Image (cartoon, rainbow, N blue to C red):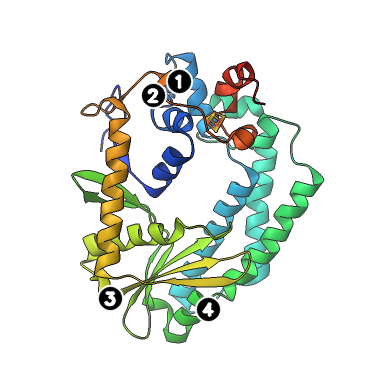
C-alpha cells in the first residue's frame, strides 16, 4: 500500500502502547505523537529528535529481541526438520547480533543520518558504553535464556508430536476491535496433543501481572483471524531466565474481560487527546512527567525532558 502522509498518526492499540501510557504520559506523547513525521528532513527539530530517540535501544531490550530472533529460528528448524538447532549455534547468533549493535553504536553519525537502519545503544548515546558489570549480566542472561528455550515445555510438546503442529511463529499482525487496529505479535502458536491451540510467549524479564493480559490479546487475535473458540485455546508464558513455564487459562469470560480492558484503555487514551477524531494530541505540557523519576536516566527520551527535570531538581 502506498504511503500517505498524515499530520497525525493513525490511532491503533497494542499492549505495549498501554504499557507506555500507564508508565509515563510524557513518554507516551513523545513516542506516539511527537515522533510522528520526525523522519522528514524539514520536520520540527524536537520531532526529529523524538524520532531518533525512539529508535535507541537498551542492551537488555536488545538481548530480549535477539533471544526472540533465535527462538523464531529454532521454531523454523523444528517446523521444517522436526529437530532443534544446537545451543552453540543459537548462542553464536545472539552474540553476532549484540556485537553488531556494539559496533554500530561506535558510529553515531551513521545512526544520526539513518536511525531506522543502524542501531544505537542507550548506554553509548547517553554515556561511555557498557560497563563490565553490565556485560557480565548480559552474558549470564544469554547463557540462561538460550538453553531454556531448547528445554522449554513448549518445544518439548511440539517435538513429541511433530514440527508441523506449529501454526504461527513470531508474526506481527492486527485484528479489528471497536473499528480500530489492535496489534498482536504472538511468538509461537501450536496445536497440542489434545487439539488445543497453545499461544506461547517467550520472556527474558521478570514475571509481571500484565503478561496473562498480553496472552489474552493474542488469543483474541486467534479468535478473530482463525475462528478459534476460547475452549480450543490455552496460553503459556515461558520465563527464559528461570526456566519457569506458566500456563494461562483462557475462558470465554476471561476473553470478555480482556475486550473490556482494551475498551477502557482506548477510552482513557482518547480522553487524553485534543481532537480524538483526528488523533490530534494536546500540547506537550499536558502530558505529565513520570511520577517515579528513578528510571528517567534509563529512558530513551531523557534528552527531551532533561531541562524540566533539572528545573524540578529531581535528578
Ligand atoms: S525521562 Fe522520565 S519523564 Fe521524561 S519521558 Fe522518560 S520517563 Fe517520562
Residue lying farthest to the left in this orientation: 179
Residue drawn at the location 53% of the way across and 58% of the way down? 68
Rendered location of residue 24, percent (x, y): 48, 35
**Which dot, 4 or 1, sits closer to the camera?**
1
**Mark 4, mark 3: which one is toward the viewer?**
3
User: In x, y percent, where is residue 1?
Assistant: 25, 38
Displayed-image quarter of ligand 1: top right
State the image coordinates of residue 134 (x, y, percent, origin top left): 74, 47
The label shown at residue 207 is none
Q: How crowded is mark 1: few (under 14 residues within 10 Å), some or many (20 or more)?
A: many
* Mark 3 surroundings within 10 Å by alpha-carbon count, few (fewer than 14), some (14 through 19), many (20 or more): some
On the rendered structure, is 244 left or right of 281? right
Residue named by callout 2: 37
Residue carrying label 1: 47
Question: Can residue 200 be seen?
Answer: yes
Decide if residue 84 is on the left or right side of residue 184: right
Which quadrant does the C terminus fall into?
Answer: top right
Residue 150 picture quarter = bottom right
Q: Nearest to the eye among marks 2 and 3: give it.
A: 3
- Counting other residues with Cα less than 10 Å from the Cα at mark 4, is it few (<14), some (14-19), or many (20 or more)? some
**Residue nearer the viewer, 13 or 193:** 13
Image coordinates of residue 126 in percent, x first then y, are 68, 29
Of callouts 2 and 1, the N-terminal one: 2
Residue at the outermost right position: 132
Q: What element carries label 3?
A: helix
Amino acid at each position: 500500500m502506498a504511503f500517505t502522509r498524515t499530520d497525525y498518526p493513525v490511532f491503533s492499540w497494542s499492549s505495549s502502547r498501554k504499557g507506555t501510557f500507564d508508565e509515563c504520559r510524557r513518554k507516551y506523547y513523545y513516542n506516539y505523537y511527537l515522533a510522528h513525521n520526525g523522519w522528514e528532513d524539514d520536520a520540527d527539530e524536537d520531532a526529529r529528535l523524538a524520532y531518533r530517540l525512539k529508535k535507541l535501544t537498551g542492551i537488555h531490550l536488545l538481548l530480549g529481541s535477539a533471544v526472540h530472533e533465535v527462538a523464531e529460528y529454532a521454531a523454523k528448524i523444528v517446523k521444517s526438520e522436526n529437530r532443534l538447532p544446537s545451543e552453540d549455534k543459537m548462542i553464536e547468533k545472539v552474540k553476532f547480533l549484540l556485537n553488531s549493535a556494539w559496533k554500530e553504536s561506535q558510529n553515531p553519525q551513521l545512526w544520526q543520518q539513518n536511525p531506522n537502519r543502524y542501531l544505537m545503544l542507550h548506554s553509548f548515546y547517553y554515556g561511555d558504553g557498557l560497563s563490565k558489570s553490565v556485560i557480565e549480566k548480559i552474558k549470564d542472561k544469554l547463557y540462561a535464556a538460550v538453553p531454556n528455550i531448547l528445554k522449554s515445555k513448549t518445544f518439548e510438546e511440539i517435538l513429541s508430536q511433530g514440527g508441523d503442529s506449529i501454526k504461527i511463529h513470531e508474526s506481527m499482525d492486527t485484528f479489528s476491535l471497536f473499528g480500530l487496529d489492535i496489534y498482536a505479535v504472538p511468538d509461537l502458536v501450536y496445536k497440542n496433543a489434545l487439539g488445543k491451540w497453545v499461544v506461547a510467549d517467550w520472556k527474558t524479564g521478570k514475571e509481571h501481572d500484565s503478561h496473562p493480559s498480553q496472552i489474552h490479546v493474542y488469543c483474541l487475535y486467534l479468535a478473530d483471524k482463525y475462528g478459534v473458540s476460547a475452549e480450543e485455546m490455552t496460553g503459556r508464558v515461558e520465563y527464559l531466565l528461570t526456566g519457569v513455564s506458566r500456563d494461562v487459562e483462557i475462558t470465554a469470560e476471561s476473553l470478555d474481560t480482556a475486550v473490556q480492558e482494551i475498551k477502557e484503555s482506548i477510552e482513557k487514551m482518547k480522553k487524553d487527546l485534543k481532537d480524538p477524531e483526528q488523533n490530534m494530541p494536546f500540547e506537550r505540557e499536558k502530558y505529565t512527567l513520570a511520577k517515579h523519576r528513578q528510571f528517567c536516566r534509563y529512558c530513551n527520551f531523557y534528552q527531551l525532558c532533561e531541562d524540566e527535570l533539572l528545573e524540578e531538581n529531581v535528578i
